[in-house]
Image: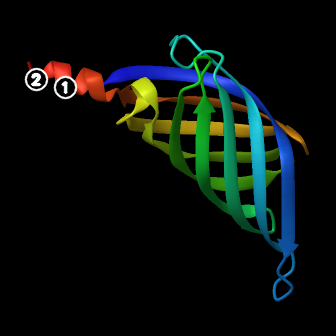
Amino acid sequence: MQQIKGSFSGRVSWATTIPQNETPRHEVSIVEIEGPQKSSDALWNDARITYWGVGETIEGNGTQHGYFIDRHADGTIDRGTFEAEVTTSGSGMTLQGTFTFTGGTGQFNGLTGGGKFRTRMTSPAELECTWEGAYQLAEAGRGAGR
């Protein structure tokens, strides 16, 4: 497995929040976030991430899970899933969790691996995320057994 880490600055493309009236400050939300990736790994540097999250919070704390796609300059994509804990405090909202690669196109077909991430909302519509983990391209896996 190849080690990887990076970051991205994201912006909310759209979001919908649905209040659940049986409990005060109970909300279900759906959000789309987009932004450019930065990584020392050339495969991910300058890729553009889009992710879609579904969250549930009570009093600002809860969970979010969803899907992501990274669009690379050559037109290929990688994709995966994520799960996070959402915490709101006086300093704002943070999400901490894990992600799993589930494949992609081109050289990312058969991509496996994953890692962890931490996201901090810097405003109601912007965020900063750092991530790290490991991945293996399917070609690398086939070549290792020869």
In three-dimensional space, the C-alpha distance between marks 2 and 1, rounded to whole angstroms, equals 6 Å
Which residue is located at x 39 percent, y 28 percent? Answer: 134
Mark 2 touches mark 1? (CB < 8 Å): yes
Q: Which residue is mark 1?
A: 142
Left or right: residue 120 compared with residue 17: left
| Residue at the extreme left | 146
Quadrant of the snapshot with the N terminus? top left
Of residues 85 and 50, which is closer to you in this image? 50
Quadrant of the snapshot with the C terminus? top left
Which residue is located at x 51 percent, y 16 percent? Answer: 43
Q: Position of residue 33 (x, y in %)?
A: 76, 42
Circle 1: element type: helix
Mark 2 residue type: Gly
Q: Using the image, tell me which numbered label, if any, was put on residue 113.
A: none
Which residue is located at x 70 percent, y 26 percent? Answer: 8
Q: Is residue 50 visible?
A: yes
Q: Using the image, tell me which numbered label, if any, was put on residue 145.
A: 2
Q: How is the image coloured?
A: rainbow
Categorize mark 2 by other alpha carbons within 10 Å: few (<14), some (14-19), many (20+).
few
